Amino acid sequence: MGFLNLFSKPAPGVQVLPSGTLTVDRNNQILATTISSACSQEVLQEIGDQVLRLFRQARTAQLPLSELTLHFSSLKITARELRGGAIIFLAPKHSFNAFS
Amino acid sequence: MESRHKVLIVDDDPAVLELYRELLAQLPSHPEIFTTTSGARALSMLKSEPFRLLLCDLKMPKMDGLQVLSIVRRQFPELRTVVMTAVHSEDFRARAYALGVDLFWLKPDTQQNMEMFLQCIESLLGRDEEGGFRGVQSKSLMDLIQMECLSQSSTVLRITRGALTGRIWILSGELIDAETDGACGESAFRRILEWKSGTFENLPTEPGRERTINKPANALLLEAAQAMDEIAAPASQNPEDVEQADHRKTVWRLASLTRAGASFVVSLPGGPESKPEGWGTEATQELGLWMQQALESAQKLSRDLQAGSIGHLEGRSLDHRIVLLPQEERTYLVGWPADASAPQLSEPSKQLVASWDS
């Protein structure tokens, strides 16, 4: 009865913030991740790219950072430099940890 | 004829829309109700006529409620927004409030909840119509204090500028005490008067407050005004005076830096061709460039992930801990020693930069 699926509408949903860990090497190749597969590969690459770029540009500015945390109103991104690559932690903020 | 407020309801379920239309029609203010099943259509309706309130569902196809609300917040900042959803999630609640919604409401399931919901909506529709005067935007702090003193009032003025807070005690029109950031008496009063903008509130009087300021209020206000005029160094004065004023500002800022225990501050104005200014560092240009790049990266991530507005960015190197603080007109980068004792440096950084432009 699989043909009936042709007529089913996709269920509406809300985009969920990524949560978990992502490890990338210096070329932004994803080495390991615990982030849900609902979050696309492109988005993960984009996160890795921006984080590596931030570390690289900081080094150029004579500020060689080993750790970086970006606080958004709904998400906290923490990244640690790993020999040119990075391990990145993504933690959505809930009302009980929104101020941490 | 009295105009009726317009309310727009967005939900992908037409049955829910009909239900809410009937419910909201019973409100005492009799608002005009408009409905739509799609976020995109809602945005075009908001553009075509002025609405007072938007009620938005979260789970919708194509464009979800959070996407609609983030666009609405940017394009229609005056519009009151309410999220009504059946999704019981702390994550969505936090994200909705981060987007600046006025109310996040789980779809009512009992008669009592429904009544409360309707009361909240009625209150949101009529909030601006209450009587009274609000705001004295064009008045300086000096004007405010003069008004309080001339009217012989007794009050405590609580003044807030960013992370800084100060209090000024006035008793029967006389200035008796002031307090801010570890300072008290006349020195605190002068420091508060240096703040160019902020907010104030009148607290109940404290008759038992010990008097530490004995000079008349007018004399103190005059002294403060003269000191501020000297620092401002108008263009008509000769270049030596201007140079001296700049020098005084630099010394004052370096003293603030040392007092707070920070290593350096870089300030980057908002414009596209803006030049960074630095204190306590020789790499001002390089750091200014990185600040620009970091802001762009953070803005891109915020957009792509729908992570909400950028609060701040913290970093750690072998020598320093840094805090990048995007503010309304400028972005600041505050550097602290690597062994700075505070676990969170965002608050001390905010306090330091709050007094920076005073």
Image (tube, coloured by chain):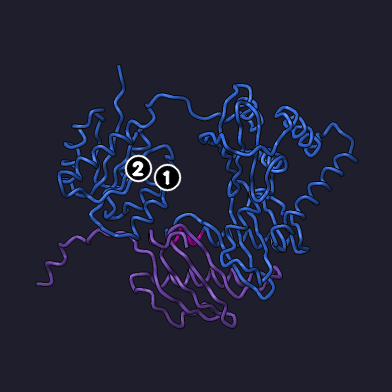
> Is residue B8 one of those drawn in magenta?
no
Residue B141 falls in which quadrant of the image?
A: top right
Q: Amino acid at mark 1?
A: Arg
Where disc 1 sits, the SS reads helix
Quadrant, the N terminus of chain B: top left
Which residue is located at x 68 percent, y 60 percent?
B289
Residue position for label 2: B81
Task: Please state the extent of the stretch shown in magenta in the rendering.
Answer: B300-305
Dot 1 or dot 2: first in sequence order is 1
Vertical placement of residue B206 versus B319, above or below: above
**Structural crowding at the residue carrying mark 1, measured as other residues with C-alpha within 10 Å and reported as few (<14), some (14–19) or many (≥20):** some
Chain identifier for the purple-coloured part of the image: A
Compared with residue B105, is residue A66 higher up or lower down, i.e. above or below? Answer: below
Q: CA distance from mark 1 to mark 2?
A: 9 Å
x 80%, y 51%: residue: B251
Tell me: B311 left or right of B178. left
The C terminus of chain B sits in image quarter? top right
In the displayed structure image, the side of residue B156 where residue A38 appears, left or right? left
**Horizontal side of residue B112 vs B204, given as left or right:** left
Relative depth, front residue between B205 and B26: B205
Q: Which residue is mark 1?
A: B73
Chain B is which colour? Answer: blue
Given residues A94 and B57, the one toward you in this image is: A94
Residue B60 can be seen, yes or no: yes
Residue B300: x %, y % from top left: 51, 60
| Disc 2 residue crowd, few under 14, some 14–19, many 20+, Cα 10 Å | many
- Residue situated in front as seen by the camera: B200 or B232: B200
